[in-house]
Image (cartoon, rainbow, N blue to C red):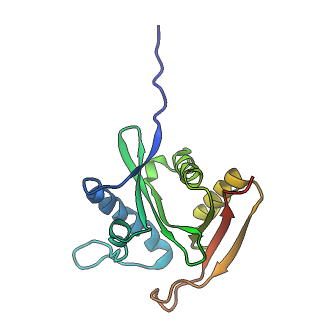
Amino acid sequence: MVRTAEPARTALLPVGPEQRPVVERLAQLYRHDMSEFLGHLPAADGTYAFSKLPLFFDEPGRTALLIQHGSAPVGFVLTRPMPEGATSISAFFVVRALRRRGVGHQAALQLLRSRPGAWGIAFQPANAGAARFWRGVATAAVGSDWREESRPVPAQAPVDAPDDQWILLNTDRP
């Protein structure tokens, strides 16, 4: 009898002190990916700056979650509260080996369903893959009950940074 392996499960795990270095290493891959759209270059030591990352471990209201697929850490999600009361997905990353295989989609839906309410998801319009991904996730989460708008990047971004594209939705609605 031939046994087939069960598909690996995707899970979102809260990041404690022991997983923080894992997320910090994965964040280097994320910053590298984003350099294509934002023009970030590595520092003299070969690493990418991510000055806001510590806030997601230390500041109340912000969260860091590890995306695990089977036993492997394959990405992360960073969330923060927005002034209008929504939760923002500030960063979302899945390793290239698992992109377009449903892992990110599964993790994103788990996240949105874990915390009913208003959500804001920003991405760079030049990142066509992110645009397709988040539009598909929004539709899977709430059907056509979401909207999209352009907003300026935060004041501390480079002057020439293009506006962010935002998807706004509410998972509280029936």
Q: Which of these two is toward me, 99 or 14?
A: 14
Q: Residue at x 47, y 47 (%)?
A: 98
Position of residue 75 in the picture relative to residue 84 (left or right): left
Q: Which of these two is toward me, 40 or 71?
A: 71
Q: Which of these two is toward me, 32 or 133?
A: 133
Residue 41 % position (x, y): 36, 78
Which residue is most to the right? 144
Which residue is most to the top? 1
Residue 158 % position (x, y): 46, 88
Q: Which of these two is toward me, 49 or 115?
A: 115
Q: Please identify the quarter of the rendering in which residue 53 is found.
A: bottom left
Q: Residue at x 61, y 57 (%)?
A: 133
Q: Is residue 107 above or below residue 156?
A: above
Q: Residue at x 37, y 71 (%)?
A: 59
Residue 14 % position (x, y): 39, 53
Q: How many marks?
A: 0
Residue 70 % position (x, y): 40, 37
Q: Is residue 172 above or below residue 61?
A: above
Q: Is residue 89 above or below residue 14?
A: below
Position of residue 145 in the picture relative to residue 14 (left or right): right
Q: Residue at x 70, y 71 (%)?
A: 148
Which residue is most to the left? 45
Q: Please identify the quarter of the rendering in which residue 152 is found.
A: bottom right
Position of residue 19 in the picture relative to residue 153 (left or right): left
